[in-house]
Amino acid sequence: MTAVLLDAEGHLRELRRVPPLRMEGASRPIDWSAAFRAAGLDMREFREAAPAYHSVAGSDRRYAWLRVRDSLRVEAASSAGLPVWFALPEASAAAVADPTPSRSLMLSDPLAVMLAVMLLVAMFFARLNVVRGRADARGALRVGLFATVAMLAGLVLIARHTTSAADEWAMLTILAGTSMYYGFVAWLCYLAIEPYVRRRWPDMLVGWTRLVNGRFRDPLVGNEILTGLIAGAAGTILNAIAVLLIARFAVVVPANPLALPGMRTPAGVAYVFLDAATTSLTYGLGLVTLLVAVRRVLRTDPAAWLVTTLLVIAAAGSGSIDSLAQSATILLAVMLALRFGGVLGAIAAFFIYYVAAWAPLTWQTSAWYFNRSALTMLALAALAAYAFRIALAHKPLFSGALVDDEANT
């Protein structure tokens, strides 16, 4: 029941500790110099002040200090001579004074409405396709099972397990429900879009259909995956640049990726890849579902592509300027991947974006999470190499034409 918040340089910004229900010992002052040193502050530069904040934990003594030259405030609290709170509340207001997560990290209302409408549209078209005998039920079942199993495996990897069979069963029940939701959405969207896309944009489904049918070494599969990876990497880089520029002008503080679930356990890297695979599959099929619905309304391809892109960017980016920049960069990349790499390319673009967003990457070997970063980058490089290799269709990287030309000279 202890939480420690650090800044990017490892300095203490907040310590929260929930004391035992029963505290033995008299109330007495304590020495906070160690906490000041952990925060990178010189206690001699501060003078005592009247406390202005309450700690989230129970306490019998409150403390406050103020630095004269810049009015930096430090607050603390103790209970029975033990520290229960130490914070720079005004320097980390989002984490201390307002515990509500940033809106940019949450699902914005317009996007939630769009997702709900998309599911209703998918239900309508899926039922229509099944009734008319057009649905690829076998392919939809494979897609749904993959999404369910991949999400469940990822969630189990990062779950906090216990030795209690009852607690484990309760936890697995909840995780299975979440996993089955993702599987249901993927299954439903595939039933809804497959007949229409096969008839209207057949090129978009060729690589995907071959992959679903188990043709993992098909050259077109490798080509579409590689196209999506390149587009997703470009969108991810542009997204990082946009976020850094926004943060540079102090418009918003970027989310700390070290606090994501993938960093909580040693199996975090595997969780990130499994979760990203499931999420990218679901979002990719959902995006195509929206495109199909808009196309059936507008009746023209260019207008459908443009309106779909603008709708998703506007809905996903309605929360804040940073979410608008992120949604614009990555969704433009995904739409390009969908146009030139088909459904499989769009899923691959989503995949690399989510892996990069959920697994903090660094080239600094001194970083404590460098091993996970290196493993993530090696896995992505292996995926790209695999896609590139099978895209060559067993042909050599360099043809013999160059050798022949040199021999002739």
Image (cartoon, rainbow, N blue to C red):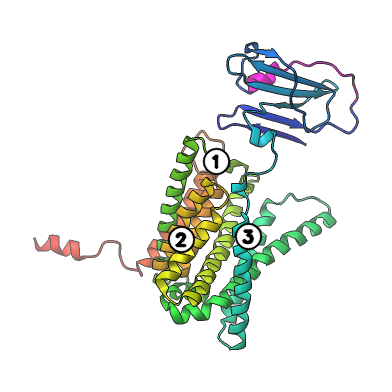
Residue at position x 56%, y 40% from top? 369
Residue flagged by tag 3: what amino acid is it? Ala
Label 2 to label 1: alpha-carbon separation: 22 Å
The numbered mark, 2 or 1, whose residue comes first in the sequence reads 1
Residue at position x 72%, y 35% from top? 3
**Residue stretch rendered in magenta on the structure:** 24-38
Question: Height in image: 306 above or below 261?
Answer: below
Quarter residue 50 falls in: top right
Residue at position x 69%, y 43% from top? 100
Label 3 packing within 10 angstroms: few (<14), some (14-19), many (20+): few
Kindly identify which residue carries mark 2. 334
Label 2 to label 3: alpha-carbon separation: 20 Å
Secondary structure at badge 2 equals helix
Residue at position x 56%, y 67% from top? 286
Q: Position of residue 12 (x, y in %)?
A: 64, 27
The numbered mark, 2 or 3, whose residue comes first in the sequence reads 3
Closer mark to the observer between disc 3 and disc 1 = 3
Kindly identify which residue carries mark 1. 254
Label 2 packing within 10 angstroms: few (<14), some (14-19), many (20+): many
Whether residue 31 is in magenta: the answer is yes
